Image (tube, rainbow, N blue to C red):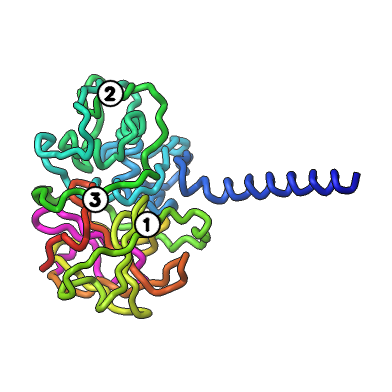
Amino acid sequence: MKSTLKNIRSIISFLLSGILLFILISPLTADSVHIVEKGQTLYSISKKYQITVAELRAANNMQENDVLKAGQKLVIPTADISAAAALSANPAPAAEFKSSGNKANSTYIVQKGDTFYGIARKYNIPLSELLAMNGLGNDAVLKAGQKLTVPGGISSNSGISPANGKTVEFASSQQEENSSSGTLAKSGAEPSSMDLSAADPRKYSKAPAVDSQLVWPVKNPQVTYVKGKVSGVQLGCKKNEAVTAIRSGTIMYCGVYRGFGEVVFVQSKTGLIYAYTGLGSVEIQKGDYVVSGTQLGTAGIDTISKKPQITLMVFQNGMPMDPAKAPRG
């Protein structure tokens, strides 16, 4: 009898632990709804949830001049740094987009109430890919009856889960750099105190041999490739080491991004987005033009490894490419 009671207690304890873990992790992995309060703006709400204003607009199909009303419901999208990168610049025309898949594309007719996030989820593709396929940028707004190019062979009402967590392969380094400039609102939110170790999305792989003369944001880094929600290179470095730009460009976004600490996006003249994440401090401002070698900030301490390091990601039309093959200078 005592053994049976002990087993029941163990099962209950296990179930309660699972429920608690789900409650802690779910805000990081699922969309939520925010009820607008009097005086709130998209900017203040983006700071609260540590995402970009552009992502809020895209998730709610809002135009730049739309005004919020108290009591209005806003979808707060899952933080997705590749989507943030896609929304920071106008992608190449759809005809120049090279999908990683081999399936033929089809056409989707936009319905009333549709959003880019919702359609991307129906077709199990990243938001960045949907925007790039249609040559759309951060100012795009959907209209009922509008035709969108989408992947073929997938039903629009299949209820497929989001593709945010799937592994993303690097885009070919031979693709042309052809995005034009866009903007992202700066976020000044305080870093999250939540421990992300239980929700570590990173998948590590040994770095291939690279040119020893290759310029990195920090000196003599320990290079580790990561894939998953984060697709790029992790660079081990010294505590508070200076982080410098490896490519000249314009600061499109700087501030705290959920799960990534202090983040800086630099867009090159040819359209590539260089994302420096995990910084401890930032020393530039949105809109600044920086040349290669300019200090962007200092290296931070990774919340999971507890070691000084940053992550470098490079995006072409919102799709990740190998940072070792990205242009420098």
Which of pointers 2 and 1 lies earlier in the amino acid sequence? Answer: 2
Q: Between marks 3 and 1, how big is the CA–CA gap?
A: 22 Å
Q: Residue 27: where, in percent of width, then height? A: 50, 47
Q: Amino acid at mark 3?
A: Phe
Residue plotted at (21% across, 22% down)? 107
Q: Between marks 3 and 2, how big is the CA–CA gap?
A: 23 Å
Density class for disc 2 (Cα within 10 Å; few <14, some 14-19, many ≥20) is: few
Q: Between marks 2 and 1, how big is the CA–CA gap?
A: 34 Å
Q: Nearer the viewer, mark 2 or mark 1?
A: 2
Q: Nearer the viewer, mark 3 or mark 1?
A: 3
Q: Assess whether residue 157 is covered by the magenta stretch.
A: no
Which of pointers 3 and 1 lies earlier in the amino acid sequence? Answer: 3
Q: Amino acid at mark 2?
A: Gly
From the viewer's perspective, is residue 267 above or below residue 4?
Answer: below
Q: Name the residue beneath numbered marker 3.
A: 170
Density class for disc 1 (Cα within 10 Å; few <14, some 14-19, many ≥20) is: many
Dot 1 falls on a residue whose secondary structure is: strand
Q: Name the residue beneath numbered marker 1.
A: 257
Density class for disc 3 (Cα within 10 Å; few <14, some 14-19, many ≥20) is: some
Q: Amino acid at mark 1?
A: Tyr
Residue plotted at (47% across, 60% down)? 192
Q: Name the residue beneath numbered marker 2.
A: 153
Which of pointers 3 and 2 lies earlier in the amino acid sequence? Answer: 2
| Residue 319 or residue 271, whichever sits in front | 319
- Chain part drawn in magenta: 263-290
**Quadrant of the rendered image containing residue 139:** top left
